[in-house]
Structure formats: C-alpha cells, structure tokens
Amino acid sequence: MTTTDIAKAGGSLAISPDQLGWTDEQAAVLRQTGIDNDVTNAELASFLHLCQRTQLDPFSRQIYLIGRWDNRQKRKVFTPQTGIDGYRVIAHRVIAETRHTFGYEDTLWCDSNGQWRDVWLSASAPAAAKVTVLRNGQRFSAVALYREYVQTDRNDNPTRMWANMGANQIAKCAEALALRKAFPHDLAGVYTAEEMAQADNPSADERHLRKVQPGQGDPWATDPEPQAPRAVNGRSQEAQDFATTAAGAADKAALQKVYREAHAAGLLGETVKTPGRELLELGAFLIQRGNELAEPAPAGPAPYSMSDAVAAEGAMDSTADEGVVDGEVLSPEDDYADAVAQLRAAAAEARLDMDNFEVDAAKALGTALADAPVPNIRALAATIRAAA
C-alpha cells in the first residue's frame, strides 16, 4: 500500500508501485503485444517506470511499447505510446488529486494564408492547429503543423485517416503538445499515436517530436558523450548519489531500500547518468538494476501473523510463504476481519500514513477495502512486510 497509485491490471498482472522488474507472466503478455527480442533492458526498465508514473495499464492496452527501425542507431527503437484518451485520463486524474481547475479554450485551425478559424470546413487539410489548455488559471498553448505530423504512404500522399480527417488528427497532436506543457512530469516520455504517425512514414529520415523538458532523456538521442545532469538546488546531485548507491547494491533488498528513499525524496523522475554512460530517469535506472540483481537469500520462515487466540485453538497453520494460510476454518466475516487486521499491522510496521489507511488500501487493491477479496488483502500485507 502506498500513496502512489497502481496501474489497474488485476490479479498476477497488477503492477506494484515499487516493482523493480517485469515478472515472467507480465513479460509473456508483453511479448504478445509485439515487443520482441530487439527490445533492450533499458527500454523495458524505462517502460515499467513510465507505467508506474503515469498509472496507465499496458495489459489493458492503455499504453504500448512500439518498435520502429531507426537508421541512425541501426536498430529497432522501442518508444512508449498511448492515445489522446490516455493523455486525458492522466490529466483528469492529476486534477482530481490536486483539486486544480482544468479546461480548454476553443480549438483553432490555421489556413495556408495564416488565418485562424474556430471551425474547419474546407475539404483540404489545415496548415496547423492550436489548442490551449487551462490549468489552475494558467494558459498552456501549443501549435502543431500539419506538415510535421501527417502520416504518408509510399507515394508521399496522406494516408486515408489523415486525408479524410486531417483537421481532427492535427488537433489531437496540438492537444497532446498543450497537455504535455500543462502536465510536464505526468506526461513526460510518452507520446500519442497521432504524434507518432509520421514516424512510420516510409521516407521519414527524422522525427519531429519535441522533448518534453530540458534534460529529459530523448529516446533518439545519439550524443556519444552524454553529460552528467546539472544540479538544480542540489536535487540532480542527490539523485545521482542514489544512482551511484544503486550501482553498487549487492541484492534486490538493498536496491529496494534505495528505491523507497528516492521515492520519498521525490527524485525518481530526475535524470541521472548510469555507469554505462546512458542518461535515464532515476526510477527507470533502479528498475533496470533490479533486473540485473539476484533475489536476496531467504531469511527463514515468515513470522506467524495470526492472533494468539486463533493460534491457541489450532484453527489454522501459518506457512512460510508470505503468510498464506492452510486449513482455513474461519467464517468469512472473521477471515476478512483478520486479513484487514494483518494489513493494518503491516502498514503500521512500515510506518505508512495510517490517517489515510482505507483510501491508500483502495488505491493499491483497485477497489474499496470492504469489497476486496481476502487473498488480495493478505497478499498486499505480505508485500508491505517484504518491502519494509
């Protein structure tokens, strides 16, 4: 349980907020979405970190990792991608959490003579579109040029979607740019399908996507000598220190401690230079390191977590596997109460915010605590104990 939301996949595919690598089952499902062996560990680690940060679920097709051949790198490069609806989901979620105001001004389209219109009636495509997002009284405007984003066929003609709905397609690109200005951290590193359409052009020699923020890792950066991130109020240097500690971690237990401390300091989104001289967000690097490290040696049977009264009656036996109970004889009501009690105890031991216990539990479980299945509650308690 944590104040960081979890991508809602459910069951064994659920992505936990402190997960440091894809599970075998998650990886198997990802391969079915088109992620092949050309993907790098760094790209997989960055994708996991992005799913955690954006709370978009790759197993519900809310976010994808799409591979495209890159002539400069001479390999297939995998880039996170979502639809404009995914951007809107993230924006509304952030607004609900921050209680900011949010809205749009009317979308505008521009003709080839520079005249702006609030409705596009011409059969030909507009030269550009402009979208302005309003967040908490601030205006975030963006203009997308049709020629930069249009998807073409091998004859350099617009594809059917762009030929028939060019005004709608370019407006989506402008909206994505404006939303990324208004929500720079929440939308950094992921592009919409409409923005990425031109990357599939047969004759495209370069991509026109723009960096979200100065210092944000560019998926297509080719600088052979990346520079270490500059310290801003000491934050980048502190993030780099976490990266150095993670590079020397001996096992996942030590790495999880670094992850929790970096998360508490709000540094997972900071860019760091890795030992391989690659620039990554700190969270993505920690996940990548988690894939490289072995699990810590088991410390023996898990502590018995049932109440003394139940133990004295011999109603059930505790196993050494994450508090799973054999020989269940409790009534459903008592079983549920016991599971919640274990979850509260685990949260208290981990020094989590008990004032928001039920709210945080609902976020982690994907449903209200009162409606959650008992096995899911017990599994969450075991996860918190393992991470504490």
Image: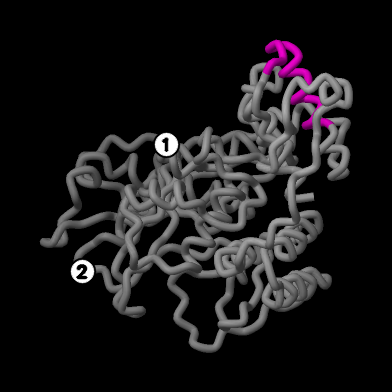
Of all residues, the one furthest to the bottom in this rendering is 225
Which residue matches tag 2?
203
Q: Is mark 1 on a helix, strand or loop?
A: loop
Viewer-nearest of discs 2 and 1: 2
Closer to the camera in the image, 104 or 33: 33
Closer to the camera in the image, 122 or 342: 342
Quadrant in which the N terminus is drawn:
top right
Give whichever of discs 2 and 1 has the lower sequence position.
1
Question: Is residue 143 in view from this perspective?
Answer: no
Residue extent of the magenta highlight: 329-344
Which residue matches tag 1?
118
Q: What element carries label 2?
A: loop
Closer to the camera in the image, 120 or 21: 21
Which SS does the magenta portion mostly show? helix
Label 1 near label 2: C-beta < 8 Å?
no
Instruction: Provide residue 302's location: percent of width, then percent of height.
Output: 75, 44
Q: Which amino acid does label 2 sit on?
A: Ser
- The residue located at (53%, 33%) in the rendering is 10
User: Is 75 on the left-hand or right-hand side of 357?
Assistant: left
Q: Distance between the residues labelled 2 and 1?
A: 33 Å
Of all residues, the one furthest to the left in this rendering is 155
The relative height of residue 288 versus residue 74 in the rendered view (above or below) is above
Q: Which amino acid does label 1 sit on?
A: Asp
Closer to the camera in the image, 65 or 16: 16
Give the quadrant of residue 188: bottom right
Instruction: Provide residue 32's location: percent of width, then percent of height.
Output: 32, 48
Q: Look at the image and say whether residue 47 sits in the magenta stretch.
A: no
- The residue located at (88%, 26%) in the rendering is 308
Give the quadrant of residue 222: bottom left
- The residue located at (31%, 79%) in the rendering is 74
